[in-house]
Structures are given as C-alpha cells and as structure tokens.
Image (tube, rainbow, N blue to C red):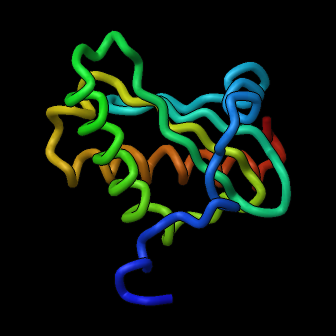
C-alpha cells in the first residue's frame, strides 16, 4: 500500500449501509467513555467500523470536524487492539469536539480494549 493510502479504510473495513448501522444500534452492546460511545456486535470475518455524529451537534462544519477527528483517533487506536469480526459504531459525544486529541485516542483505545476483553470473556453482543 502506498504511503498516501496507509491510513485509509478499505471498503471491506467500513460499515456502509443503513442496515449495517441499524443492526449494531439495535442488537449491539455498548461501552461509554467521556467523549465517545462505542457500540459493537459480532459480525463477519473482518472488523468493520462506522462513525456517527448526532445532528444535535449543531452545524455541518462541527459534525464533519468531529467525524474526521473520530476517524483519525480510530486509526491511531486500531492497531493495538484486536476486535476481529466485530461491527463497531463510534458515536461522538459533545466532548469529542473539544477534548485534546490525545484524550480522544485514549478514550477510544480504552473502549476498544473493553470490547476485546468482553469478547475474550465470552460476553459478546
């Protein structure tokens, strides 16, 4: 993979359809942290991720900024945590806009660690 595409998500690693998101929201388990809520559901063979930002976060510019911050934080956190086969939705809380980026990465890594631990313990969604 080229240096430019090193951090990108291939289509197979993304939740792309409304039905995929709804399945996780409806049947998934959740882990809450100060800046994010992470929902997950055991899925197929590969880990897939999606990002959600509520319209209660006013302004498209702010919503898009939070979504970009979440994607980048996930890129930083995903390599150290193994949640293979899970469909994951990262939902932004208002703090995701203002928290320092390092704190956002720590929150996300902590949530992904909790998911991995629950999956190993057999308490999967």
Quadrant of the frame with the C terminus: top right
Question: For this view, does 14 lie left or right of residue 107?
Answer: right
Question: For this view, does 112 lie left or right of residue 59?
Answer: right
Residue 80, compared with residue 98, is above or below; it is below
Residue pictured at 21% horizontal, 30% vertical: 61
Residue pictured at 43% horizontal, 79% vertical: 6
Dividing the picture into quarters, in which one does residue 46 lie?
bottom right
Residue pictured at 75% horizontal, 50% vertical: 119
Where residue 116 appears, as percent x and y from the top left, is: 65, 54
Where residue 85 appears, as percent x and y from the top left, is: 77, 57
Q: Is residue 28 visible?
A: no
Dividing the picture into quarters, in which one does residue 22 lie?
top right
Question: For this view, does 70 lie left or right of residue 78?
Answer: left
Q: Is residue 12 visible?
A: yes
Residue sitting at the far bottom: 2
Q: How many marks?
A: 0
Residue pictured at 31% horizontal, 47% vertical: 68
- Give whichever of 39, 11 is nearer the camera: 11
Residue sitting at the far top: 56
Question: For this view, does 80 lie left or right of residue 96?
Answer: right
- Give whichever of 96, 57 is nearer the camera: 57
Residue 26, compared with residue 23, is above or below; it is above
Residue 28, compared with residue 65, is above or below; it is above
Where residue 74 appears, as percent x and y from the top left, is: 42, 55
């Amino acid at each position: 993979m080229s240096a430019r595409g090193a951090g990108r998500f291939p289509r197979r690693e993304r939740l792309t359809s409304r039905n995929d998101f709804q399945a996780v929201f409806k049947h998934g388990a959740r882990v809450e942290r100060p800046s994010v809520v992470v929902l997950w559901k055991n899925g197929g063979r590969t880990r897939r991720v999606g990002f959600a930002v509520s319209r209660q976060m006013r302004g498209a510019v702010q919503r898009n900024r939070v979504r970009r911050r979440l994607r980048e934080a996930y890129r930083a956190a995903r390599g150290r945590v193994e949640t293979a086969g899970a469909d994951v939705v990262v939902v932004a809380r208002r703090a995701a806009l203002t928290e320092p980026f390092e704190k956002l990465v720590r929150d996300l890594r902590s949530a992904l660690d909790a998911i991995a631990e629950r999956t190993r313990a057999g308490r999967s969604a």
